[in-house]
Image (spheres, rainbow, N blue to C red):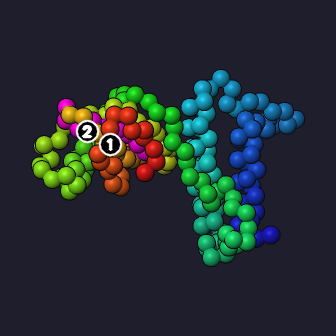
């Protein structure tokens, strides 16, 4: 067994234990529920964060041991592991709150620049108001945000990345010509 396969096996076992909601205690191996008392949204955010942590730990161990990615088996010959396929899901839709308003405010110059590129006009032509959002836990937090343009019927969807430390900024392209009823999804 290669070191890569060993790390991937450990990550699979950790993920399985976490998703079952069990934690081995030092005193005789008894278990206790890890996620007891949390709502489903919080559980999902914790699971996403744990998967990101495992992925980062895996990459750190690979680097520390000097193992290159070329040593990994080809994907078509081995079952994909949880570590290598860790796309995080989006949380449930939420109404805009102070957290997303702050992120939108920080990312506003970049968003307006992209609006000018896509629709023309001047940055001051656009007034932005967050309506709702979904989050994705990353190394930081990504807000998939529905934003109302000016006071009209037009909406856009914006992806805003807020790192653990620092200011939020627009990430990728905007989805323009959206309506109030369009659901926010990954883009």
Please, what secondary structure does the residue beneath circle 2 have?
A: loop
Q: From this viewpoint, which residue is outermost toward the bottom?
A: 70
Q: Is residue 125 above or below residue 7?
A: above
- What is the x, y in percent for residue 129? 26, 33
- Residue at 37%, 28% in the rendered image: 97
Determine which quarter of the picture holds residue 150.
top left
On the picture, is 55 further left or further right than 145? right
Q: Is residue 142 magenta?
A: yes
Residue identifier under label 2: 154
On the picture, is 42 further left or further right than 77? left
Task: Specify whether residue 47 is in view.
Answer: yes
Measure the C-alpha gap from mark 2 to mark 1: 6 Å
- Residue at 25%, 38% in the rendered image: 154
Task: Provide the major secondary structure of the magenta segment.
Answer: strand
- What is the x, y in percent for residue 59? 60, 61
Determine which quarter of the picture holds residue 49.
top right
Residue identifier under label 1: 178
Viewport quadrant of the N terminus: bottom right
Q: Do the residues labelled 2 and 1 touch (CB within 8 Å)?
A: yes
Q: Residue 126 carries which label?
A: none
On the picture, is 74 further left or further right than 123? right
On the picture, is 45 further left or further right than 186? right
Magenta span covers which residues?
Answer: 141-151
- Residue at 17%, 41% in the rendered image: 126
Task: Specify whether residue 99 is in view.
Answer: no
Mark 1 Cα-neighbour bin, 10 Å: few <14, some 14–19, many ≥20: some
């Amino acid at each position: 067994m290669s070191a890569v396969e060993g790390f991937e096996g450990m990550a699979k076992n950790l993920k399985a234990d976490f998703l079952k909601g069990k934690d081995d205690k030092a005193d005789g191996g008894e278990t206790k529920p890890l996620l007891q008392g949390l709502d489903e949204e919080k559980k999902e955010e914790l699971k996403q964060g744990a998967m990101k942590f495992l992925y980062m730990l895996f990459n750190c161990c690979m680097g520390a041991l000097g193992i290159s990615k070329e040593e990994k088996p080809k994907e078509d010959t081995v079952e994909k592991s949880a570590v290598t396929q860790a796309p995080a899901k989006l949380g449930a839709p939420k109404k805009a709150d102070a957290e997303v308003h702050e992120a939108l405010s920080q990312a506003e110059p970049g968003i307006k620049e992209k609006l000018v590129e896509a629709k023309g006009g001047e940055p001051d032509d656009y007034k932005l108001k967050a309506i709702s959002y979904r989050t994705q836990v990353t190394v930081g937090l990504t807000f998939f945000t529905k934003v109302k343009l000016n006071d009209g019927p037009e909406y856009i969807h914006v992806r805003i990345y807020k790192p653990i430390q620092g200011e939020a900024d627009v990430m990728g392209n905007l989805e323009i010509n959206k309506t109030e009823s369009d659901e926010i999804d990954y883009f």
